[in-house]
Image (cartoon, grey):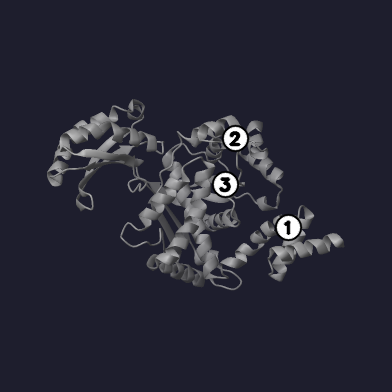
Amino acid sequence: MSIDSRLPDFRNLSPSERLEHIRQLLDLSADDAALLRDAGALPLEIADGMIENVIGKFELPYAIASNFRINGRDLLIPLVVEEPSIVAAASFMAKLTRPAGGFQTSSSAPLMRAQVQIIGVSDPFNARLSLLRSKEQIMALANSKDQLLNKLGGGCRDLEVHTFADSPRGSMLVAHLIVDVRDAMGANTVNTMAEAVAPLMEEITGGKVRLRILSNLADLRLARAQLRIAPEQLDTAQYSGADVIDGIIDAYTFAAIDPYRAATHNKGIMNGIDPLVVATGNDWRAVEAGAHAYACRSGHYGSLTTWEKDSAGHLVGTLEMPMPLGLVGGATKTHPLAQLSLRILGVKTAQELAEVAVAVGLAQNLGALRALATEGIQRGHMALHARNIALSAGARGEELEWLVKRMVEARDVRADRAEALLREKRGQ
């Protein structure tokens, strides 16, 4: 189904009007709309089966980011997040990319690593070669534990063995099973395989296996996004697009060389990625862990994105990072809203979902860098922050818009000021 992701005037509609527009655009059912409209989308009995000691449920705002065109196809992006400005910034940056075709993405195969730690080996280098010599036997045993994965085209694909001859606990081997997990995130699959091959590895090496667990540094499971923006797309009343591009590249360079800046820079990337991961029921903690480990793979913690100028003076941005997402298993299959999010996206494979995630992350990073390179981050946050302050002060309906406007115009967004203005208005 082909859609138009631009959603003109969407922000000016009420929540119910927005929902009706999306329902018609995507041909959602009445039940789908009810999941988004009404509290209680996740039945308590399902929640109780998902984690331990459940006493209730916790909701966050569910929004749609607009204007995204990825590999020539328009998509609506469901985001679950509490922080103001994220959805607006991602949508606006996606709009700026459209004249040049939007985002181009690609990804590697969905390969995950399972680690098997082997201690007590007196001849670690010899033991490593013994394991590699037995690779086919080890892989066959691993694959015997998931016949369905084999039928779907996945399975254990390779064996790596890393030698740590002088660890504080003596010599140590760490074997990596490289597993194609297809459309799963893959944690349960690779953990099961690691446990299955542990006795055989002990027999081959004469050592003792300790840990048998996946690695969240999914450096073989990468997703990539690219964008290009002409200078005139970045023109403002105060800044030329060429100056904005130079400012963005200077801001990126700061993050590339300074880990203190890089931490905030990369957090901004994850501001776009995490809400999509949450909306689809995936493990945002695994994605975060892999992202930050990947950012320091060279021994220096730096930027996950790159920003450059091409020969025509256009701004070009890229993002390549681990993205271990799944469409099957876990909350993606049990949470009704996670399933609805996947239908809204229209993705068919985990790799497609990973590519959408990095496109959103790249857009979000661009939004932050553009703001920092021009008026500063606070001006853009002001109106959105003012809404939260106004809501917490008790404003509703027409009062809310009036109070936000008054605080923003005065550049005075504070809780005590909001309460005073609200008392003044109600007194009138």
Please provide percent x and percent y for residue 227. Answer: 46, 57
Q: Which quadrant holds residue 120?
A: top left
Q: Nearer the viewer, residue 351 or 264?
A: 264
Look at mark 3 in the image and give the residue it sits on: 80
Q: Earlier in the sequence, mark 3 or mark 2?
A: 2
Please provide percent x and percent y for residue 238. Answer: 59, 73
- Under circle 1, the secondary element is helix
Q: Amino acid at mark 3?
A: Val
Please provide percent x and percent y for residue 406. Answer: 75, 65
Query: Is 107 on the left or on the right of 394, as rendered?
Result: left
Query: Is 212 on the left or on the right of 95, as rendered?
Result: left
Vertical arrangement, residue 220 with respect to residue 376, above or below: above
Quadrant in the picture for the C terminus: bottom right
Vertical arrangement, residue 100 with respect to residue 107, above or below: below
Is residue 389 visible in the rendered image? The answer is yes
Mark 2 and mark 1: span between their CA atoms?
30 Å
- Would you say the residues marked 3 and 1 are in contact, meaning their CB atoms lie under 8 Å apart? no
Q: Amino acid at mark 2?
A: Leu
Look at mark 2 in the image and give the residue it sits on: 42
Look at mark 1 in the image and give the residue it sits on: 393
Q: Nearer the viewer, residue 314 or 52?
A: 52
